[in-house]
Amino acid sequence: MAVTVYMLGDLRTRLRLAVVVAITAAGFYWIIWYAVQPNVFDGPVSFLYSQAKVLSWPLLLIIAAISTVLTVLICRRRLPDLPVLVFAAGLCVLSVRSGPAVWVRWYHDGSGNIYLKFALETLLLTAVLWGVHRLGKLLLARLAPTGHKVEQSKMKSGAASFLPAFGLAGLVAFVVVFLVTTTVRTNIAGIRTYTVYSSERGQIIFAALAAGFLSTLAGHQSFRPSKSISCWLALPLVGMAGYLILAGFGSPAGEPLPNSPLGNFLPIDFVGPGVLGGMLGLLLSHKLFRNRDTEES
């Protein structure tokens, strides 16, 4: 059955995946981090606000290319989007080491609207992610042409599902981000309010992971598009749209709108933990489809 090429396979394949993830994470930890690390301890991590922004992007492209090639060579045809998972896992290293996003305003005061730069950075990181996706597919087509084939009938039936899947995934991602980042506060009178959004890094990372996972799972399960990119790419694009809204309707200094959680996310959160969660949701969705098809046959 064609869907089986999307699964991770046996224990050996998972161990191979773990090795590639470890190599990519080490590259981000030992190479990329020193190019994008903030000026102060526990400061926010941003490629456009880094000390060596000119050097950080070429290094990112090199690590992306190396991780993609290694993933395809080691894991082969198990999952066409597996290089995306590995690269997103590497970005999670930066996301975990970063400080709160709101500190960007304090450390870079007078540098313009930060959310315009965040939107641009999200777009650039998403473009790198798309490049990883395309390079992985090209390498798979050359190294494993028979295992990488997709049935023509499935491609035709899934082509019309791209936009609905993307729309549903984006909506679910937006809702999950708002729900997970809500922090319950209790005032002196003991009245609870849900109008304050957390900037705690652990909660932000979990929110991105959960939003990516649930949005991709919902979009893929509902419409089963032939191009899974329509599902796992929804969260980064929602984040970019959110930055543009904050830039257009926030204060001139780039302050976020009241009760807006998107201002507490960094671009690496959407493209790192967010896409990693999306890939995990995609794996689960393919497994559910495989089990369903097995039962029907």
Image (cartoon, rainbow, N blue to C red):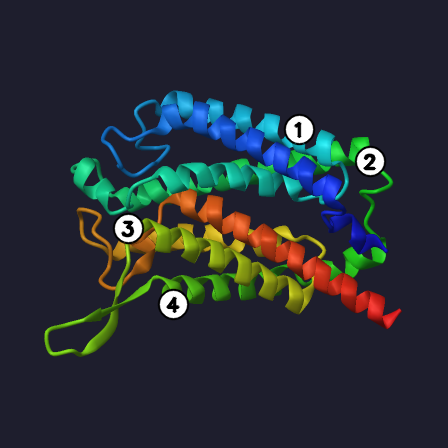
Marks 1 and 2: which is nearer the front?
1
Image quadrant assignment for residue 258: bottom left
First in sequence: mark 1 or mark 3?
A: 1
Is residue 225 among the parts visible in the rendering?
no
How crowded pointer 1 is (Cα within 10 Å; few <14, some 14-19, many 20+) is rated as many
Image quadrant assignment for residue 64: top right
Depth check: 158 or 205 in front?
205
How crowded pointer 3 is (Cα within 10 Å; few <14, some 14-19, many 20+) is rated as many
Q: Report if the CB atoms under discs 4 and 2 are less than 8 Å apart.
A: no
First in sequence: mark 2 or mark 3?
A: 2
The C terminus - image quarter: bottom right
Q: Residue at x 84, y 58 (%)?
A: 153
Q: Secondary structure at mark 2?
A: loop
First in sequence: mark 1 or mark 4?
A: 1
Marks 1 and 3, Cα distance to the nearest angstrom? 39 Å
Q: Which mark is residue 179?
A: 4
